[in-house]
Amino acid sequence: MTSPADTDAYLATVPEPQRGALQVLRRQLLAAAPGATECVSYGMPAIRKTGVLVWFAAAKAHCALYPSGLVAEFADRLTGYETSKGAIRFQPENPLPPELIADIVARRIAQDDEMAVKRAARKRR
């Protein structure tokens, strides 16, 4: 299976209602990360600054956000959603709250910025 060329190509393969839910999520993620760009990583749409901030995807029975290991940090706000160590799964009719998405992205941006500073410091040595 070939990886999609971009987020639009990925979403074109996703059936409704997941496609609609992911399009809303995509807009929310981009709004929460000014200056971020879209890419496809591991075959999934992703939002990146220096590195990938989050991934999102559709499965047969749900949609998912992959916040790069932050699930446990936000566990108290994820009641009612199915989670694993690296994924937050939600139904299109029960999307993640916009405030939660904004907070997850803000935390990932902070982590991304920290990593960029560390990488730059290593290069200067």
Image: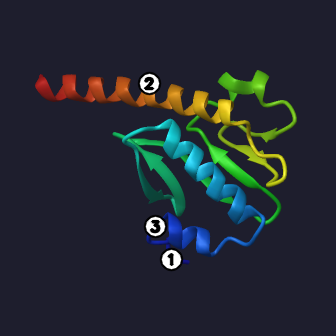
* Mark 1 surroundings within 10 Å by alpha-carbon count, few (fewer than 14), some (14 through 19), many (20 or more): few
Q: Nearer the N terminus, badge 2 or badge 1? A: 1
Disc number placed over residue 40 in the picture, else none:
none
In this rendered view, identify the residue nearer to me: 16 or 3. 16
Indicate the quadrant containing the C terminus: top left, top right, bottom left or bottom right. Answer: top left
Q: For mark 1, what is the residue?
A: 2
> Which residue is found at the position 60% from the left and 27% from the top?
103
- Percent of width and height locating residue 48: 42, 45
The x, y position of residue 113, in whole percent, is: 36, 27
Q: How is the image coloured?
A: rainbow
Residue type at mark 2: give it: Ala
Q: Is residue 39 left or right of residue 63?
A: left
Mark 2 and mark 1: Cα distance apart in space: 32 Å
**How many C-alpha atoms fall within 10 Å of the one at disc 3: few (<14), some, or many (≥20)?**
some
Residue corresponding to mark 3:
6
- Image coordinates of residue 14 in percent, x first then y, are 67, 71
Neighbour tally class for label 2: few under 14, some 14-19, many 20 plus, Cα within 10 Å: few
Q: Say what amino acid the circle numbered 3 marks.
A: Asp
Badge 2 is on which residue? 110
Q: Secondary structure at mark 1?
A: loop
